[in-house]
Amino acid sequence: MGNQGSVLSEEKLQELEKATNFSAKEITKILKRYGALDSSPNGEEGIPITKFLNIPEVVGNPIMPCVFAKFSGPRGGNLGPEPFLLLFSMLHPDQPMDKKQKFAFDMLDVDSQDQLGFEELFSLYKLLYSPALSDQKISHLTAQVLFRDDLATPGYINFDEFCQLVPVSEIKSRLTVQLQLS
């Protein structure tokens, strides 16, 4: 898999450039880095979550298991080369904030109802504030947020409300990763 970047057709390389925040040269480097993590001959095995979470740029970020799950597919399998590239494009510092906010919301909206309920918001707060806050305190905080008078639907927050509740600085700090490509 280490050669993946060099065996891409010019057409595929251009397609990936348009779909990501990376130049052709950067794509080749990222796929080479992918190849160092996926030891299978053609990248067919993918990268398991354990290897992904050990990438120095993502170590210690509590939201990364959720990011991995969003890109590894519905069965929660390994991460293939193109999803690896798309994942780091989403986390790229140049990715527009509105796209990062939508990604964060969709990542949490596990039932695809375009709203977050108790369990989904609780899981977000648990990722962000555990172990500093107990589950009981996180539960209380979640309930306070979901039963505010200004919500469109009591007990749920929609995307616009999510954007108002979660500071841009939090999204930026959790969903921005600058891969070292030297």
Image (cartoon, rainbow, N blue to C red):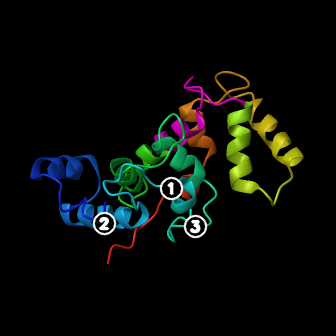
Residue at which label 3 appears:
59
Q: Is residue 110 in view from this perspective?
A: yes
Residue 132 spot, x, y in % from top left? 81, 60
User: Within 10 Å of the Cα at label 1, are there few (<14), some (14-19), or many (20+) other Cα atoms?
Assistant: many
Residue 67's disc is: none
User: In this picture, which residue range is highlighted in magenta?
Assistant: 102-117
Closer to the camera: disc 2 or disc 1?
2
**Mark 1 and mark 2 in contact (Cβ < 8 Å)?**
no
The kind of residue tagged 3 is: Val
Residue sitting at 51 percent across and 34 percent down? 74
Image side of residue 72 versus residue 147, left or right: left
Q: CA distance from mark 2 to mark 3?
A: 20 Å
Q: Residue furthest bottom?
A: 182
The kind of residue tagged 2 is: Lys
Q: State the image quarter where residue 152 is shown.
A: top right
Q: CA distance from mark 1 to mark 3?
A: 13 Å
Q: Is residue 173 in view from this perspective?
A: no
- The quadrant in which the C terminus is found is bottom left
Tell which circle, 2 or 3, labels the residue nearer the N-terminal end.
Answer: 2
Tell which circle, 2 or 1, labels the residue nearer the N-terminal end.
Answer: 2
Image side of residue 162 versus residue 25, left or right: right
Residue at which label 1 appears:
175
The question of residue 112 being in magenta is answered with: yes
Tell which circle, 1 or 3, labels the residue nearer the N-terminal end.
Answer: 3
Front residue of this view, candidates 67 and 144: 67
Front residue of this view, candidates 87 and 178: 87
Residue 32's disc is: 2
Q: Residue furthest front?
A: 41
Image side of residue 53 versus residue 43, left or right: right
Image side of residue 140 versus residue 116, left or right: right
